[in-house]
């Protein structure tokens, strides 16, 4: 039963991940200067996820050999780590942006609601375009990560022959 649960959670994570990938591709994420995420990391994460599910399906179809289960764990863990390579900087940038916004709001309130002058940007123009990851909905990012982590835990339990 655990292998089937792992497969279902993988499919949910894949649907959520495909939504994020669609946003990334449509926003020009693969183009220089449009994303903080390297194309190689994005492709490695997506490719690792596809490989992990293929290994899990093979495990289900081929008399459940232990080596295949642990290979699935290794590929899933690697894929998860690539996801963390993308998530942690995204989260830190987002957090800094929220803190800056809160600071500007506090300054506005302290100034009695009068608009504050914005510092002039000497390089305002096309280079100031925000990275495409700023368009990611928080709920989808968090749900994708949580479901993917649950999948990893289930795959480890499968490899330990607990299901």
Image (tube, helix red, strand yellow):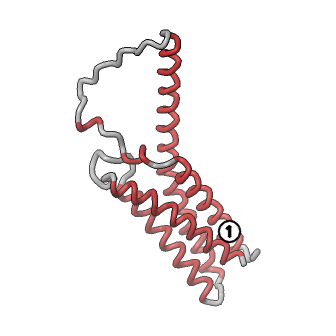
**Picture layout, residue 101 above or below residue 7:** above
Determine the residue positioned at 33% across, 18% down.
Answer: 119
Task: Tell me where residue 12 sits by quadrant.
Answer: bottom right
Residue 112 placement (x, y as % from top left): 50, 10
In the image, farthest residue toward the right: 162
In the displayed structure, 19 sits above or below 126; it is below
Image height check: is 105 above or below 95? above
**What quarter of the picture does the C terminus occupy?**
bottom right
Q: How many marks do you count on the picture?
A: 1
Residue 84 horizontal/vertical position (percent): 53, 52
- Compared to residue 123, the image places residue 47 above or below, namely below
Q: Nearer the viewer, residue 118 or 38?
A: 118
- In what quadrant of the picture does the N terminus appear? bottom right
Residue ID for mark 1: 154
- Residue 75: x and y in percent read 54, 69
Q: Nearer the viewer, residue 77 or 86?
A: 86
Q: Residue at x 49, y 51 (%)?
A: 85
- Residue 127 is left or right of residue 146, and the answer is left
Assess disc 1: are there few (<14), some (14-19) or many (≥20) residues with their C-alpha within 10 Å of its C-alpha. many
- Residue 114 locus on image (x, y percent): 43, 12
**Helix, strand or loop under label 1:** helix
Residue 66 appears in which quarter of the rendering?
A: bottom right
Q: Is residue 76 left or right of residue 131?
A: right
Q: Residue furthest top?
A: 111
Does 147 sit left or right of 123 as displayed? right
- Which residue lies at the image location 36% right of the left edge and 15% below the top edge? 117
Most extreme residue toward the front is 113
User: At x 49% / y 57%, what residue is drawn?
Assistant: 82
140 sits left or right of 70 in the view:
left
């Amino acid at each position: 039963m655990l292998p089937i649960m792992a497969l279902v959670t993988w499919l949910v994570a894949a649907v959520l991940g495909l939504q994020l990938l669609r946003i990334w591709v449509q926003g020009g994420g693969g183009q220089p200067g449009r994303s903080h995420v390297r194309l190689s990391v994005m492709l490695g994460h997506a490719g690792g996820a596809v490989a992990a599910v293929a290994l899990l399906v093979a495990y289900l179809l081929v008399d459940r050999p232990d080596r295949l289960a642990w290979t699935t764990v290794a590929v899933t863990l690697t894929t998860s780590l690539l996801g963390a390579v993308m998530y942690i900087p995204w989260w830190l940038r987002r957090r800094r942006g929220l803190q800056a916004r809160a600071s500007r709001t506090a300054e506005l309130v302290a100034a009695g609601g009068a608009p504050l002058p914005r510092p002039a940007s000497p390089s305002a123009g096309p280079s100031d375009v925000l990275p495409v990851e700023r368009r990611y909905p928080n709920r989808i990012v968090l749900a994708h990560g949580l479901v993917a982590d649950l999948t990893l835990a289930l795959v480890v339990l499968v490899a330990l022959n607990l299901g």
